[in-house]
Amino acid sequence: MSFDNLVVNHKSFGMGTIVSKQGKYITVKFENAQKTFVYPDVFDGFLTLADGSVPLEISCDLAKVKLEKQLILDKKIEENVRAMTKGIVIPGKEIINEVEDDDRGYNSQDSDKI
């Protein structure tokens, strides 16, 4: 698919024309500015063709990127679970035993201070 000179609509910047696509970036020239966006991510709710559609090729590229991101996230979650079952503490994932406040508005551990 050729992206050059495609007329697009951005939800914040309005109508524009794609002037180039290089790797994972597309550059769009708007009336008052030229902006570069990550492709195909920008087509996930921000950019459409002028008629409001997203072509099948772009939709497929977007689905592929979303799947790759989900696989990375699933792998990280799996690694975190595996580490926690072995007693390894992952920074930012520490389990803290919290003591809930009782009805009187103070910590039950502090009740001996009354």
Image: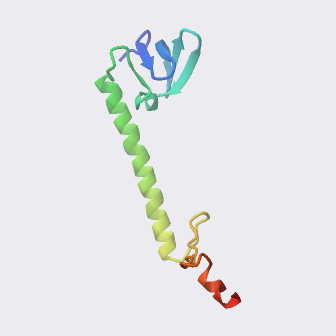
- Quarter of the image for residue 3 reads top left
Q: Is residue 2 left or right of residue 97?
A: left
Q: Nearer the viewer, residue 33 or 4?
A: 33
Q: Is residue 37 left or right of residue 91?
A: left
Q: Position of residue 114 (x, y in %)?
A: 69, 88
Q: Position of residue 24 (x, y in %)?
A: 49, 28
Q: Nearer the viewer, residue 57 or 52?
A: 52
- Determine the residue located farthest toward the bottom in the rendered image: 112
Q: Position of residue 99 (x, y in %)?
A: 57, 78
User: Which residue: 45% across, 23% down?
Assistant: 11
- Quarter of the image for residue 77 reads bottom left
User: Which residue: 41% across, 12% down?
Assistant: 6
Q: Position of residue 48 (x, y in %)?
A: 38, 21
Tell me the colour scheme of the image.
rainbow
User: Which residue: 40% across, 50% down?
Assistant: 71
Q: Is residue 27 left or right of residue 48?
A: right
User: Which residue: 51% across, 70% down?
Assistant: 83
Labels in figure, total = 0
Q: Quadrant of the N terminus?
A: top left
- Quarter of the image for residue 9 reads top left
